[in-house]
Image (cartoon, rainbow, N blue to C red):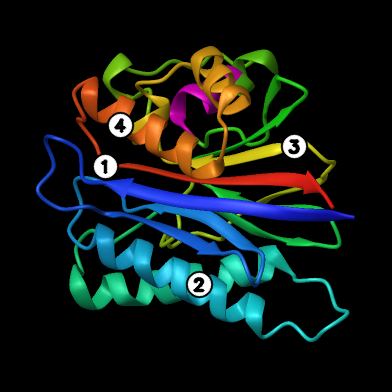
Amino acid sequence: MLIFRSAALSDVGRVRSENEDRFLHDEAAGFYGVADGVGGLPGGAEAAQLAIDELAAALRAVPAGQEADLPAAFRTLNESVRLLGQRMNPQTGIATTLTAGLVRAGVLRIGHVGDSRAYLSRKGVLKRITEDHSLENEVRRRRAMGELVSYRESQRNALTRCIGQPSPLEVDVFSETLAAGDRVLFCTDGITRLVPDRELGEMLAAAASPQAVVESLVQLAVRRGGPDNATAVALFADAV
């Protein structure tokens, strides 16, 4: 049997005037995750907040003993964000990433859209659970299939999927059976663009507590210039 410790932290950084990141952190309910309002569009904070609020409400509404349908929940909140965007910014809409999920009976289930990330550290070895939905990764995938495609370097981080998009939403879903000693991290790209996976993994494995690692990662991102909002949610699994 496992018990869980967790913590969450967000910082606006040194450049942005508003924090458009949001996090889901409900240890009692077992809900965790992050959302990053898409920069350059008005309403990013509202998009991220609505996505987090609606996902939490959808997860709480799942009857006991039933498994949450994460793709359906994500598609429903995608429509809510899209409709809010039509009211707030009819020309371009609003959007957010969302990487979040829940723990039930020792199993972590994650839904993922965008370029926020989830990681698992087990016995000191870091695994990136999610894959960024970026133009760079999409081009790499298509090239591997033999297609001749290219992109401008300035567009490499452009999102190919986001919450609030008008087209049908494809949702990545992952499941991880947790073991004693496992450490899970959700974070936005305000951290991952400044902290390489190797360094992130070392910090996650060495941290004494979830609070310590979220503080270390967020503070490090800010010290390295803080060009974006930085948000982290950490979950540690311990043996009873």
User: Three-letter amino acid code at disc 3?
Assistant: Asp
User: Three-letter amino acid code at disc 1?
Assistant: Asn
Please tell me whether residue 149 is drawn above or below residue 78 in the rendered image: above
Which residue: 67% across, 86% down? Answer: 61
Q: Position of residue 204 (x, y in %)?
A: 57, 28
Marks 2, 1: nearer the viewer = 1
Return the disc, 4 or 3, that comes first in the chain's sequence: 3
| Residue highlighted by disc 4 | 219
Q: CA distance from mark 3 to mark 2?
A: 30 Å
* Image side of residue 239 versus residue 201, left or right: right
Q: Are marks 3 and 2 in contact (CB under 8 Å)?
A: no
Return the disc, 4 or 2, that comes first in the chain's sequence: 2
Q: Are marks 2 and 1 in contact (CB under 8 Å)?
A: no
Q: Is residue 96 magenta?
A: no
Q: Which mark is residue 229?
A: 1
Which residue: 51% across, 61% down? Answer: 25
Q: Nearer the viewer, residue 218 or 173?
A: 218
Q: Are marks 4 and 2 in contact (CB under 8 Å)?
A: no
Mark 3 element type: loop
Q: Position of residue 191 (x, y in %)?
A: 38, 31
Q: CA distance from mark 4 to mark 2?
A: 31 Å
Return the disc, 2 or 1, that comes first in the chain's sequence: 2
Mark 4 element type: helix
Q: Are marks 3 and 1 in contact (CB under 8 Å)?
A: no
| Residue highlighted by disc 3 | 182
Q: Are marks 4 and 3 in contact (CB under 8 Å)?
A: no
User: Three-letter amino acid code at disc 4?
Assistant: Gln
The magenta-colored residue range is 134-140
Q: CA distance from mark 2 to mark 1?
A: 23 Å
Could you classify mark 1 by the number of other residues whose Cα lies within 10 Å: few (under 14), some (14-19), or many (20 or more)?
many
| Residue highlighted by disc 2 | 77
